[in-house]
Image: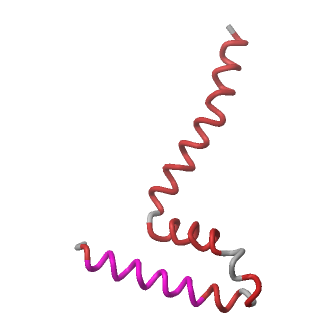
């Protein structure tokens, strides 16, 4: 994939998300859902980054518990 293809895909995804935002929300709620839109765009444009962040978050959150349990067992 070249840069132009990636850029066009990103712009198309952003346009579709913008249309979806206008359809789903009323005028007074548009500001509240902007962070959710950016999160959704990040998931759609770079799913492997989001997957890696989830795995790292899981390991850091539960890894500390596993280490404490291992210390208690010894």
Quadrant containing the N terminus is bottom left
Q: Where on the picture, by quarter, is residue 57?
A: top right
Q: Nearer the viewer, residue 29 or 14?
A: 29
Give the vertical position of 56 relative to 1 (above or below).
Answer: above
Residue sitting at x 63%, y 21%: 67
- Residue 73 at x, y = what percent? 71, 12
- Residue 65 at x, y = what percent? 69, 27
* Outermost residue, left side: 2
- Residue 34 at x, y = what percent? 63, 74
Quadrant containing the C terminus is top right
Q: Nearer the viewer, residue 1 or 41?
A: 41
Q: Where on the picture, by quarter, is residue 69?
A: top right
Give the vertical position of 67 relative to 44 (above or below).
Answer: above
Give the left or right position of residue 46, taking residue 68 as reference. Answer: left
Q: Which residues are magenta?
A: 4-19
Give the vertical position of 24 relative to 63 (above or below).
Answer: below
Q: Is residue 10 magenta?
A: yes
Residue sitting at x 63%, y 68%: 35
Q: Nearer the viewer, residue 35 or 46?
A: 35
Give the left or right position of residue 2, taking residue 34 as reference. Answer: left
């Amino acid at each position: 994939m070249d840069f132009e293809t990636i850029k066009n895909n990103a712009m198309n995804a952003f346009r579709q998300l913008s249309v979806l935002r206008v359809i789903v929300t009323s005028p007074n709620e548009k500001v509240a859902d902007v962070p959710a839109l950016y999160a959704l765009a990040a998931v759609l444009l770079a799913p492997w980054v989001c997957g890696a962040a989830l795995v790292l978050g899981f390991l850091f959150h539960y890894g500390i518990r596993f280490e404490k349990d291992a210390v208690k067992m010894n």
